[in-house]
Image (cartoon, rainbow, N blue to C red):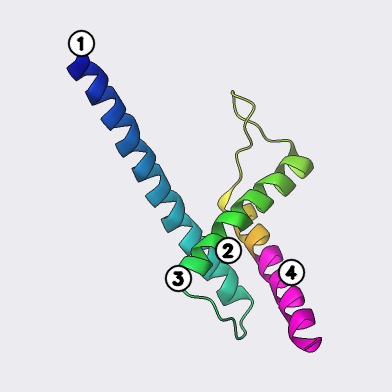
Amino acid sequence: MESILILLVVGLIVGWLFSLIWHLIIGLIVGAIARFLMPGRDAMGCLATAILGIIGSVVGGFIGGLIFGARDGRGMLRPSFIMSVIGAVLVLWLWRKIQGKSSGST
């Protein structure tokens, strides 16, 4: 009985880690596309680009839900890849505006 419980917990942890890695990979791709669409000098490494893509996916999914009302069977939004890129471009644009204001005020 204990071995089944241990296998279940290990399986959940491994599944969570693979999900996290998958989100980072997709976020990196979406963030890189957003940075390609909005060229300019950004002091961002790979991790920051992945975070940009992940946040952009959330923003894009929220905007897509407001516009299209797309939901799956569990009530969760199903953002498309295009909406993720649009969200990442918006987040990058806001980031540049914030960075411009903070560097201009010093």
Q: Is residue 68 magenta?
A: no
Q: Main secondary structure of the magenta part?
A: helix
Distance between mark 1 and mark 3 Cα atoms: 43 Å
Q: Is residue 90 magenta?
A: yes
| Residue in view at x 42 percent, y 57 percent | 25
Q: Position of residue 106 (x, y in %)?
A: 77, 89
Q: Which residue position holds label 3?
A: 46
Q: Position of residue 38 (x, y in %)?
A: 64, 77
Q: Secondary structure at mark 4?
A: helix
Residue 64 higher or lower than 30, as above or below: above
Q: Secondary structure at mark 2?
A: helix
Q: Which residues are magenta?
A: 89-106
Q: Position of residue 94 (x, y in %)?
A: 74, 69
| Residue in view at x 74 percent, y 48 percent | 63
Distance between mark 4 and mark 1 Cα atoms: 53 Å
Mark identifier at residue 52: 2
Distance between mark 3 and mark 4 Cα atoms: 19 Å
Q: Are marks 1 and 2 in contact (CB under 8 Å)?
A: no
> In the rendered structure, which amino acid carries the disc numbered 4?
Leu
**Foreground tag (4 vs 1):** 1
Q: Position of residue 83 (x, y in %)?
A: 64, 53
> In the rendered structure, which amino acid carries the disc numbered 3?
Cys
Among numbered discs 3 and 2, the one appearing first in the sequence: 3
**Foreground tag (1 vs 3):** 1
Q: Which residue position holds label 1?
A: 1
